[in-house]
Amino acid sequence: MADPRLTPLPTPCLLVDETRMKRNIARLAQHADQLGVTLRPHLKTTKSIEAARHVLAGGTGPATVSTLAEAEVFAEAGIADILYAVGISPDKLDRVIALHRAGCRLTVLLDCVAQAEAVVEAARASGIAIPAMIEIDADGHRSGLTPDDPELIRVGRILHDGGAELSGVLCHAGESYNVVGRAAHAEFAETERRAVVEAASALRAAGLPCPVVSVGSTPTAHGARDLTGVTELRAGVYVFFDLVMAGIEACSLDDIALSVLTTVIGHQEARGWTICDAGWMAMSRDRGTANQRVDQGYGLVCDEAGRLIPGLYVKQANQEHGVIARHPDFDGALPEFAVGTRLRILPNHACATAAQHQRYHVVPETPGAPLLDWPRFGGW
């Protein structure tokens, strides 16, 4: 039965299942509490003030962001403790200082001498002891210094002695996205934990402060069993989850709270295709499940109520056309969809799909309640 609340919505558009979202938020908050660490949610997925109010403790922080635009919008909304978890470049430090002067404690991230020197220069010029964390590399995924790199102490000393604030160390176990199952994620969580604790110990042994020891990725956040020596945990996509996370067993398909509402606009009967109006402009070009055990194309197909329809996926996508077809692994019977039928598509990557849209249409947890409208933003 069609949901009359969805009927007025133009397609394609972005839907959020509030019940699932709140369940996902509560699950990780409880886990962090059991592990004895502060949860610092990453807001890069939602990029929405309204969503942030649900994710953050008390609605005000602490928070993590991936762009200064996010920091500026969320600071304006009253979130006063923000970690900018992308390596800082000197040209952005004026904006960092402006945020501090507006009352937001914005912590920056770095992993080299050049960045540390730029932060110190800006701190001296502004009279603001800019807090900075040193990124630690646990698995060779991306940026960061290894715990035994002599540059770690050098960078720390530049910050501490130069007028900035050495606030701690941070690690992101990005390679955890490439393994499957809770046991494998727990192993990466321990690798992540060990790396930052070793780095923190090295700084302290050199007479430098290291009050914050931060770890996080959605797989390791859920997989962690022991975070001794860690003070805070970060994660972002867990709020909505997606097919990539389901593919590595960080969640179930029933946990995915984000979908794209689409309309059937035609058929190619000889090919067994149904054409919908959600192409890659609505779903994104992200093909994150392509290298997983099961390739989910551009997304899995649900009915308008959000119930998964077995055997269907978005096989290919053009700019404004999605091609729904039989999944290669399925040999059962498939339904037929008349032109005008509304469907939902579960995304590969929640962050990338959400970035294609300007707002969330939220299906409330209260049955029959009106849809909620949550604007979202982009930019850097």
Image: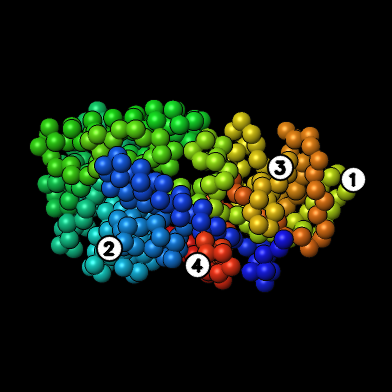
Q: Which three-letter amino acid code belongs to the residue tagged 2?
A: Ala
Residue 37: quarter of image: top left
N-terminal-most mark, 2 or 4: 2
* Cα distance in 3D space between marks 4 and 1: 41 Å
* Cα distance in 3D space between marks 3 and 4: 30 Å
N-terminal-most mark, 3 or 4: 3
Task: Give the number of the mark in front: 3 or 4.
Answer: 3
* Cα distance in 3D space between marks 1 and 2: 58 Å
Residue 341: quarter of image: bottom right
Q: Residue furthest front?
A: 367
Q: Quadrant of the C terminus?
A: bottom left
N-terminal-most mark, 1 or 2: 2
Q: Are marks 1 and 2 in contact (CB under 8 Å)?
A: no
Check disc 3 and report the residue beneath it: 310
Task: Give the number of the mark in front: 2 or 3.
Answer: 3
Check disc 4 and report the residue beneath it: 374
Residue 310: quarter of image: top right
Check disc 1 and report the residue beneath it: 270
Residue at coordinates 37% horizontally, 51% vertically from top-left? Answer: 41
Neighbours of disc 1 within 10 Å: few (<14), some (14-19), many (20+): few
* Cα distance in 3D space between marks 2 and 4: 21 Å
Task: Give the number of the mark in front: 4 or 1.
Answer: 4
Q: Which three-letter amino acid code belongs to the residue tagged 1?
A: Ala
Q: Are marks 2 and 3 in contact (CB under 8 Å)?
A: no
- Between 82 and 23, the one nearer to me in the picture: 23
Check disc 2 and report the residue beneath it: 80
- Between 5 and 123, the one nearer to me in the picture: 5
